[in-house]
Amino acid sequence: MHRILAINPGSTSTKFAVYFDSECVLNKTIRHSFDDLFHYETIIDQFDFRKGLIIDALVDEGIEVDSLKFIIGRGGLTYPVESGIYKVNNLMLKHLREGVMGQHASNLGPLLADYIALQIPDAQAFMADPVVTDELENVARVSGHALFERRSIFHALNQKAKARSHALKSGKKYEEMNLIVVHLGGGISVGAHKNGRVIDVNNALNGEGPFSPERSGSLPTGQLIEICFSGKYTKSEVDRMVVGEGGFVSFLGTNSAQEVENLAASGHEKSRFYQEALFYQVAKSIGEMAVVLEGKVDGIIFTGGMAYNKTLGFYMNQKVGFIAPIFIYPGEDEFEALAMNALLVARGEVVPKEYKK
């Protein structure tokens, strides 16, 4: 039996799970208050705090830590990589500590996995399908100016997991299907999956695609330039407009999609309008990805927390149902995706890749 520890650090929580082969025997979320984290200057400074919480919780839950031989962390903002499973190495750890592509809680995933693996005889540490997974076709990298290049930053782990799961249910191979996968969460990503590769996707982190509960998505460039040079806002304030205080936060004062759905259902017109506006922008992005796939689309998959929305299916069938059949798989299976990637390595079915710059 292969014993796996999967680690998924978030901005306000540390989540981890223990698997015995494909069976989840422990799934734990430790939430962090503002007071827990405010005195840490950077994400990396939280390493010791979160490490201690994980190890203490494993012991408290009666898990024999030395029996965990495959430790896998949610991948952070390294330099762009192809989809796959990567063995944690010193170069990866260096880039995550430096924040070469930015600071994000997921940067701690491989760092925590590496530390814990080093404490256990014969244990190994891995990362799989990080948010910087990059399989874009070259033409998709082109923006509208030579100084700017489009970047692939999206919910790769969950998008890939849901796409593979759907292919299995369909009796087909993921590598033989064309799919449009939509992750609806705090950020929203819409990806074109062609024969197992995400050949085009919006940068879901900072300023591209549909708006989300707390992110602005694409903004009118001219108006954004005017605001930047108006003297009224600092850079950090504009950054927060794009990530953290955009979307529903800006329009409705909340980042809770569930709250917006409930208000819309109760007749609150403003909530209904902006919920529909979000769906409208998502539908437009799906249309773009259908063009990328030249209209040859086997299915449109919706996933993430907002996929639980009761009106989503009806709206999307009206707007994009003509493109391909719609499949809704609510929620995220990031732990299962991490664990299954580690299990593939444990069983010798996949050889982990080497992270290089």
Image (cartoon, grey):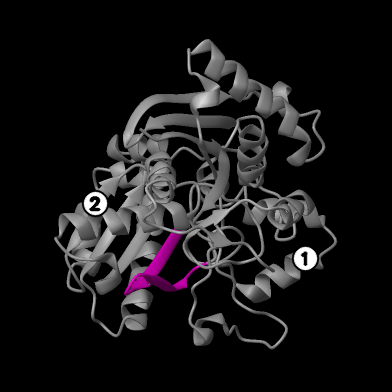
Q: Is residue 74 visible?
A: no
Tell me if mark 2 has few (under 14), some (14-19) or many (20+) residues whose alpha carbon lies within 10 angstroms of its own: some
Q: Nearer the viewer, residue 155 or 173?
A: 173
Q: Give the residue displayed 67% in from the left and 87% down from the top.
A: 145
Mark 1 or 2, nearer chain start: 1
Residue 195 lies in the magenta stretch = yes
Q: Nearer the viewer, residue 322 or 253?
A: 322
Compared to 319, does 54 lie above or below? above
Q: Quadrant of the C terminus?
A: bottom right
Q: Give the residue displayed 60% in from the left and 64% down from the top.
A: 207
Residue 161 lies in the magenta stretch = no
Q: Which mark is residue 195?
A: none
Indicate which label's residue lies in the foreground, 1 or 2. Answer: 2
| Relative side of 65 to 195, left or right | right
Q: Is residue 334 visible?
A: yes
SS for callout 1: helix
The magenta region covers 189-202
Q: Which mark is residue 328?
A: 2
Q: Which residue is mark 1?
A: 228
Q: Magenta span: helix, strand or loop, mainly?
A: strand
Tell me if mark 1 has few (under 14), some (14-19) or many (20+) residues whose alpha carbon lies within 10 angstroms of its own: some
Q: Quadrant of the N terminus?
A: top left
Q: Quadrant of residue 336?
A: top left
Residue 103, position as x, y percentages in the image:
71, 50
Most extreme residue toward the left is 171
**Amino acid of disc 2:** Ile
